[in-house]
Each structure stands twice: as C-alpha cells, then as structure tokens.
Image (spheres, rainbow, N blue to C red):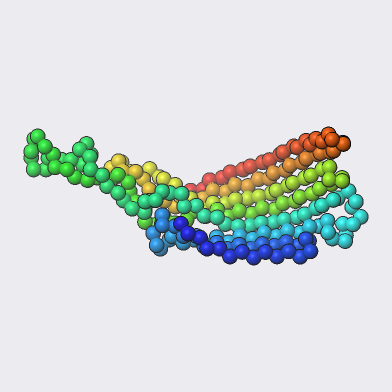
Amino acid sequence: MWSQFAKLNYVYGDKYLAQIVVRNDASSRFKSATNSGVFPAFSLGWRLSEESFMSGLTFVDDLKLRYGWGQTGNQEIGDYNAYTSYQATSFNSAYPIDGNVTAATQGFNASQYGNPNAKWETTTSSNFGLDATLFDRKVNLEFDLWSRRTTDLLLNIPIAYGAGDGGSPAINIGEMFNNGFDLAITYGDQKGDFGYSITGNFLNIKMRLFS
C-alpha cells in the first residue's frame, strides 16, 4: 500500500480554525482498475469565547464549536483476494481417470476463489462538537453528535455448494449506518495540595445494516 496526501491548515487569531486533508491511497490487494481511492476530509472550529458578544458571560472560560467531515478506506481483505488459487489433494482432486484401481491421477481443485472486481470499502464520518470550560475551569463539558456510513462493505459471502469447497472471496456488498451522541461532564477542583475530579459519561448509539 502507498499513500499520497495534501494538507492545509488555517488559523486566525485562535478564533477560527480550519484544516483540509486529501489522501490518495493505493493497494496491491485490488486489481489495477480499482486499486486507488481518494479520501478527503476537513474540519472547522470557531472559538465563541473570543467573540465580543460573549464578554458578559463571565462564567465561560472557553467555548468552542467544531465540525468535521471525512472519508477513510478499508483494504483488509488479505493479499490475494483478487486471485483464485488451487491445491492438489488426494481426497478432493485425485481420480483414477485411466481406470487404474490402485493409483489415482492427481488433479487440482480451487482452494480459494478470487474476486478481481473488489474495490475500497469507504467510511464517511461527520461530527458536530461543543467544548466548554466553565466556572473558573472547574467544569469541563464535551458534546459530540456524530454519524458514520460505510459503503461497499467488504464481506465474505458463502458460495453455492456446487462450486466446491474453495473459500469465498471478499466482495463489495451492502452498507452500514451508525449514529449517536457522546456527552462527558467533568467537575474538578484544587484545594492546596489536594485535588480531585469527577467525570460522568453519557452515550447513545444506533446501528443499521443495509444489503
């Protein structure tokens, strides 16, 4: 596998933040027609606590909104998924084709079927987040609302019995969708040499699979 990527960062006064990344990944696990995939991503941040209209909210130490979107690829299908391989065994691929009753002629049978049309599995993720530090930095809040869709899933589907006992290749079939939210709230304080913190986490996840 090899990768090429371009990255662009933009920061304006610690108030506005942006990043863009474009990857071009290629893998020898796919045939030449499908071995390359382009996976872009970007993220945006806005530190609201730096805006003048927030100056009256003295209990807010830091407040930031962020959004991210991006794609990643999966090529975990083994090194030879594109090719059919064969084996010679006396049980499956030997037959006395010449009528010999004491010895069989050795042949070959498929041990693994190949799929030359497989391509990259793609996961597209988006995330909206809020980070807040409040009350003299005693309270920290992190909230994320996210979704993730995976298309062209690479799965091994059982083949028909008539095809023999060769293993099935990974093929692109179906898609999966996940979404949910995460919320973490931390309260901490320092009294001289003694410090403590308490964190609570809440999350919700939903999953759907489409064929």
- Residue 180 lies in what quarter of the image? top right
**Where residue 208 appears, x then y in whole percent?**
56, 45
- Residue 32 lies in what quarter of the image? bottom left
Residue at left 78%, top 61%? 15
Give the total of numbered labels. Answer: 0
Answer whether residue 14 is visible to the viewer in this image: yes
Residue at left 66%, top 62%? 19
The answer to which of 12 and 155 lies nearer the viewer is 12
**Where residue 65 appears, x then y in whole percent?**
75, 55
The answer to which of 187 and 148 lies nearer the viewer is 187
Residue at left 69%, top 44%? 182
Residue at left 30%, top 49%? 85
**Where residue 104 appears, x then y in whole percent?**
13, 39
From the viewer's perspective, tell me whether residue 192 is left or right of residue 122.
right
From the viewer's perspective, tell me whether residue 13 is left or right of residue 182.
right
- Residue 207 lies in what quarter of the image? top right
**Where residue 7 appears, x then y in whole percent?**
61, 64
Q: Residue furthest front?
A: 193
From the viewer's perspective, tell me whether residue 52 is left or right of residue 26.
right
Answer whether residue 173 is visible to the viewer in this image: no
The answer to which of 121 and 64 lies nearer the viewer is 64
